[in-house]
Image (spheres, grey):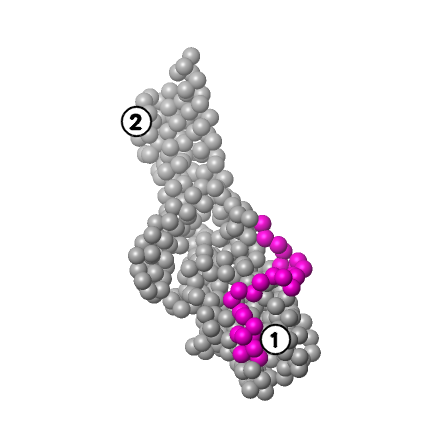
């Protein structure tokens, strides 16, 4: 009786492990939605803690960046390995429950069937069917990862192309002030330029790819000083300053870009956060703090734009209040993602850290 109960439990547990592993792979690479997969989370968390420990031993950001650059690729490669291990363990329990022999023999049969076309050494029809299904699932898991690698790297390349172009426009300081000054020099500040539409499309793609394939958030830029998080912060900061301080007619394309950026950065942030976060379109009160952009930084930016003969609103205090209302819509999400991805230190709009 006890043996029957143990074998029944092993059959149920093995079947559960197999189905859970297959569903994890489907939800990770096939389902076009941002779902949190428990197995993937465990794998990424363990590897992240290991890389964080190694990176903490270095003093400079460049050294830590070199270590963390390997985190996402290693985690992505380890994911199918863990899936295959779980698949082998699950089928081991199934074979043992069906009376194939000892646990050792069942494990050897499972391991030999995992990446082959099945095993002819099975003692019965059910065991033989199990070995062929295991072989099919094993090849399926590897195929899923290999087929989605080009898709992921295409999304990464498109993301980094915008990041690199943005750095050219912001200069070495990489501040929103420099970006606004560049827009003013090129005439795109007061006229409807193509930049805001391109950045809006970039934000839309970020929202889609970085929630359906969240490991993309941790793929670091080829250059240590670059990051998609800081690039998003630069664009949103520039839009917030222009909307609040620049005296010009409403620019619908810029406002759409700002809205798309707030939505994207908040949804990517919420994917990784345990606590719920308000929608970016929610009302923002005057009591919300501004931590990384003080009144002095905003005034410095205002003065720099004034020196560059950018048409500004006469009432500087009203401009500050409006900026203070806009900034919290994305500030917390940007800061959270910057800490999560170990991005370069964010700068305030005027260039201070």
**Secondary-structure class at tag 1:** helix
Range of magenta residues: 276-302
Horizontal relation, residue 331 to residue 251: left or right = left
The residue at 45%/56% (across/down) is: 340
Structural crowding at the residue carrying mark 1, measured as other residues with C-alpha within 10 Å and reported as few (<14), some (14–19) or many (≥20)? many
Q: Position of residue 62 (x, y in %)?
A: 34, 65
Q: Looking at the rendering, which quadrant does residue 199 occupy?
A: bottom right
Q: Which mark is residue 242?
A: 1
The residue shown at (39%, 27%) is 93
Viewport quadrant of the N terminus: top left
Q: In the picture, residue 313 is in which quadrant?
A: bottom right
Does the residue at mark 2 contact the one at mark 1 (Cβ under 8 Å)? no
**Residue under the point 41% across and 20% down:** 7
Q: CA distance from mark 2 to mark 1?
A: 69 Å
Q: Does the magenta-highlighted stretch encompass residue 66?
A: no
Ranked by sequence position, the earlier of labels 2 and 1 is: 2
The disc at residue 104 is: 2
């Amino acid at each position: 009786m006890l043996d029957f109960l143990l074998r029944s439990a092993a059959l149920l547990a093995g079947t559960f492990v197999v189905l859970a592993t297959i569903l994890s792979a489907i939800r990770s690479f096939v389902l076009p939605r941002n779902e949190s997969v428990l197995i993937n989370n465990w794998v990424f968390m363990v590897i992240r803690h290991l890389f964080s420990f190694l990176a903490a031993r270095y003093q400079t950001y460049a050294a830590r960046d070199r270590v963390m650059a390997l985190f996402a690729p290693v985690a992505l490669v380890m994911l199918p390995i863990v899936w295959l291990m779980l698949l082998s363990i699950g089928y081991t329990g199934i074979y043992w429950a069906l009376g194939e022999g000892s646990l050792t023999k069942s494990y050897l049969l499972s391991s030999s069937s995992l990446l082959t076309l099945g095993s002819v050494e099975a003692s019965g029809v059910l065991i033989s069917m199990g070995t062929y299904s295991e072989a099919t699932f094993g090849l399926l898991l590897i195929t899923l990862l290999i087929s989605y690698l080009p898709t992921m790297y295409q999304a990464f390349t498109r993301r980094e192309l915008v990041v690199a172009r943005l750095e050219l426009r912001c200069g070495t300081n990489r501040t929103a002030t420099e970006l606004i000054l560049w827009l003013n020099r090129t005439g795109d500040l007061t006229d409807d330029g193509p930049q805001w539409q391109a950045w809006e499309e970039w934000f839309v793609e970020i929202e889609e790819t970085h929630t359906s394939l969240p490991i993309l958030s941790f793929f670091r830029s080829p250059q240590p000083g670059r990051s998609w998080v800081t690039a998003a912060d630069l664009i949103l900061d520039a839009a917030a300053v222009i909307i609040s301080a620049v005296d010009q007619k409403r620019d619908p394309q810029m406002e759409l870009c700002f809205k798309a950026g707030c939505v994207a950065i908040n949804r990517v942030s919420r994917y990784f956060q345990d606590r719920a976060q308000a929608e970016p379109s929610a009302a923002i009160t005057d009591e919300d703090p501004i931590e990384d952009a003080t009144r002095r930084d905003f005034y410095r930016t205002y003065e720099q734009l004034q020196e560059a003969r950018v048409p500004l609103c006469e009432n500087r205090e009203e401009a500050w209040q409006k900026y203070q209302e806009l900034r919290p819509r994305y500030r917390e999400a940007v800061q959270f993602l910057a800490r999560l991805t170990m991005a370069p230190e964010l700068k305030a709009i005027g260039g201070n850290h």
